[in-house]
Each structure stands twice: as structure tokens, then as C-alpha cells.
Image (spheres, grey):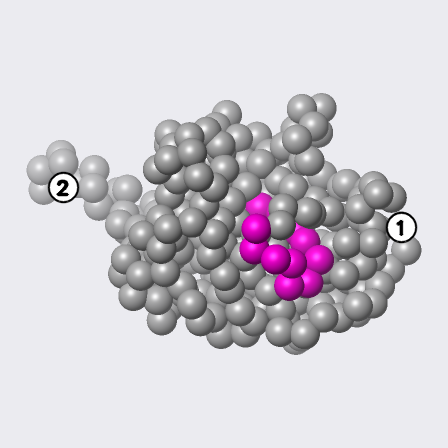
């Protein structure tokens, strides 16, 4: 076996085993919870924008060819790719079918893959069925080029570490039962870290209407990342 073939196989094996371990982790952590949103993008054609998901619905902001189904070499499953080619924002908004409108507890989970040089990938949480061109949110996460995560644009809130060129999981537990807060955890593929953020009083009314999230490629001018197996579950 040549060095190139051996090296390529080792990269494939590492990516596949990392992905398999994440599948097991998410499978066992989500057993018996009511699912409000599910998107695996398995039915999205290569190069086509997502329009239908298993549970819930999605909308896109940007050109269709900037948000499309794509495979990642060496990693199973279909992904949605967001690529920012110009100064225009590229975003995918996911929404549960019906508003819950109560002080419950919810878990958002997503697999992410951020290539080296992919710029900043962002996820934000919003009120149910917010208009696609409205940017209001009650929590915003930026996955930075240095491998840290920043909360709500506050440089003092940076935490954790995630790898580039490898699959990892972000999970956010949105607790609206008492003092509204969000607990964010990074895991899998060498990712680690967690942080808890109290939702500011100014944004709590939006938090109590939670039902949408948004994946965003917003800064810098060019950037790209992938997501799949996105779930929203209700705990209580």
C-alpha cells in the first residue's frame, strides 16, 4: 500500500469512527424524548437546497446554490452546506410545526463540520416562526476560526474548543422552567467544553416563544460549514 493510499485510508478510518461514536452518543441520549424538529437532509439532492425535513419545516436566506445538500468525503450521511461567497448573509432557519408557548425545557442538538479556513459559523435561537429576514434572537453562538465558541458577541464569554475538519456535536439545553438559561455543551471528535448563559431580561419574552433556530454563515465575507442530524426535543 502506497503512503498516499495508507494515509488516505487512515484519514477515512478516523473520520468514520469519530462519526460512528457520535451516532451512538446521540442515539442513547435522545431515547424516549418527544421530537419537535428533525432534519437529517437524507432526501435532499446533491447541490439542491433543502425544502422538506422529517419533522418541522425549513426556510433559507440567500441564493439556493449557497445552501445545498452535499456529501463529505469519508463521512457517512447527507449534510447541508452553507457557503458565503459574497457580502450577503447565508442562513438556514428551522422551525417546529406548532408553537409550544410555555415554560418548558428543550434540547437542541446538531452535528457540525467546519473546514479549516471556513470562517465563522453561527447558530442562534429565536421565537417560533420568526420572519426569515428578521434577526432577533435570545441566544447567539459564534464558532470562531481559533476553535473557541463565543456567546452573544461577548469576547469575555468565549469557551471550549472544537476541531476543524472533524465532526463534532453541539447541544444546547434551553431551560425556561425557572430563571431562563441555556446550557451549551461541545462533545465528540475532540470537541470539549460547556457554558451556561442566563438569558437577559430584555430577550426573555422571545425565549418563552422559542420554536426556531438559525444556522448562519455571516462573517467574514467568505466562509463555509456543514450541519446534519439536527434535533429539537422537549424534556418537560
Please state the horizontal and vertical placement of residue 218, each as a whole percent of the image: 50, 37
In this view, the residue farthest toward the left is 2
In this view, the residue farthest toward the right is 178
Query: Residue 37 falls in which quadrant of the image?
Result: bottom right
The secondary element bearing badge 2 is classed as helix
Q: Residue at coordinates 53% horizontally, 30% vertically from top-left? A: 144
Q: Is residue 63 above or below residue 98?
A: above
Query: Residue 102 falls in which quadrant of the image?
Result: bottom right
Provide the residue designation for mark 2.
5
Q: Quadrant of the N terminus?
A: top left
Q: Residue at coordinates 71% horizontally, 39% vertically from top-left? A: 195
Q: Nearer the viewer, residue 6 or 143?
A: 143
Q: Residue at coordinates 58% horizontally, 36% vertically from top-left? A: 142
Provide the residue designation for mark 1.
179
Please state the horizontal and vertical placement of residue 191, each as a whole percent of the image: 53, 39
| Cα–Cα span, label 2 and label 1 | 54 Å
- CB contact under 8 Å: marks 2 and 1: no
Q: Nearer the viewer, residue 45 or 233?
A: 45
Q: Is residue 152 above or below residue 12?
A: above
Q: Residue at coordinates 37% horizontally, 51% vertically from top-left? A: 63
Q: Which residues are magenta?
A: 123-133
The secondary element bearing badge 1 is classed as loop
Pick whichever of labels 2 and 1 is earlier in the sequence.
2
Viewer can see residue 235: yes
Task: Please identify, in this view, whether the residue under mark 2 or under mark 1 is nearer the observer.
Answer: 1
Any magenta on residue 149?
no
Q: Nearer the viewer, residue 210 or 15?
A: 210
Please state the horizontal and vertical placement of residue 128, each as a whole percent of the image: 68, 63
Amino acid at each position: 500500500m502506497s503512503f498516499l493510499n495508507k494515509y488516505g485510508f487512515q484519514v477515512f478510518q478516523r473520520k468514520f469512527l469519530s462519526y460512528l461514536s457520535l451516532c451512538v452518543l446521540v442515539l442513547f441520549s435522545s431515547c424516549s424524548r418527544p421530537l419537535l424538529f428533525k432534519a437529517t437532509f437524507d432526501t435532499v439532492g446533491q447541490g439542491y437546497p433543502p425544502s422538506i425535513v422529517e419533522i418541522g419545516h425549513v426556510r433559507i436566506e440567500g441564493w439556493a446554490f449557497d445552501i445545498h445538500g452535499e456529501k463529505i468525503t469519508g463521512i457517512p450521511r447527507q449534510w447541508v452546506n452553507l457557503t458565503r461567497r459574497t457580502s450577503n448573509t447565508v442562513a438556514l432557519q428551522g422551525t417546529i410545526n406548532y408553537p409550544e408557548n410555555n415554560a418548558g425545557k428543550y434540547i437542541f442538538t446538531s452535528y457540525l463540520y467546519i473546514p479549516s479556513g471556513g470562517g465563522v459559523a453561527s447558530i442562534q435561537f429565536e421565537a417560533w416562526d420568526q420572519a426569515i429576514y428578521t434577526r432577533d434572537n435570545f441566544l447567539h453562538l459564534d464558532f470562531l476560526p481559533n476553535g473557541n465558541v463565543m456567546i452573544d458577541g461577548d469576547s469575555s464569554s468565549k469557551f471550549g474548543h472544537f476541531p476543524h475538519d472533524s465532526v463534532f456535536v453541539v447541544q444546547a439545553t434551553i431551560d425556561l422552567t425557572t430563571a431562563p438559561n441555556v446550557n451549551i455543551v461541545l462533545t465528540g471528535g475532540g470537541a470539549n467544553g460547556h457554558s451556561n448563559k442566563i438569558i437577559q431580561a430584555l430577550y426573555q419574552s422571545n425565549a418563552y416563544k422559542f420554536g426556531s433556530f438559525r444556522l448562519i454563515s455571516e462573517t467574514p465575507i467568505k466562509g463555509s460549514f456543514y450541519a446534519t442530524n439536527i434535533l429539537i426535543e422537549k424534556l418537560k
